[in-house]
Image (cartoon, rainbow, N blue to C red):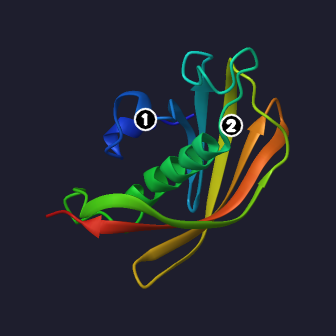
Amino acid sequence: MADLPHPSELIPHRGKWLLIDRLTSMDGATVTAEADFSAELVEGHFPGQPVVPGVLLLEALAQTMACLHMTMDSAGADGASRGTPFLAGFEKVRFKAPVLPPATVALKVRVTEQRFGLTSAVGTVTLDGKKVCQAKLTGAILPSE
């Protein structure tokens, strides 16, 4: 595996809001990453039966897409970012099974189209090789002020 940047080198998320722990591969328009979910992270959802909220799985996919987007043509000639990645939308979201912490999920995002400043992608989340979530994502990089 080639040396890949840490997600914090590509996207602005920090602290508990940086959900992806490591990038595992980047190949053209596809990126894979891993996210570790602890029981403490999801404390209270639900007491006695912790479950990783689906919205966190979607956010982890969006962050994975943002990492790829930031390494594509969105950087200037000097490699500096031209802005901040944002999730613009998601559709056709399906949750196939709950994720019970502690768990490490694999995230895979493949960019399908880039036009008019938007990036479209398909993403999947797997746990132990089984698909637990899938979605179509749209993202954009908004210029820094």
Q: Position of residue 115 (x, y in %)?
A: 47, 83
- The amino acid type found where label 1 is placed reads Leu
Judge the density around disc 2: few (<14), some (14-19), many (≥20) Cα neighbours within 10 Å. many
- What is the spatial separation of the Cα atoms under label 2 and label 1, in whole angstroms? 15 Å
Q: Position of residue 100 (x, y in %)?
A: 75, 24
Where's the N terminus, which quadrant? top right
Q: Which residue is mark 1?
A: 18
Q: Position of residue 78 (x, y in %)?
A: 19, 59
**Residue drawn at (65%, 37%), measured in percent from left and top?**
53
Q: Secondary structure at mark 1?
A: loop
Q: Is residue 46 above or below residue 13?
A: above
Is 94 situated left or right of 140 in this image?
A: right
Q: Residue 26 versus residue 139: which sits nearer the camera?
A: 139
Q: Which residue is mark 2?
A: 106
Q: Nearer the viewer, mark 2 or mark 1?
A: 1
Q: Secondary structure at mark 2?
A: strand
- The quarter of the picture where residue 105 lies is top right
- The amino acid type found where label 2 is placed reads Ala
Is 124 situated left or right of 23 in this image?
A: right
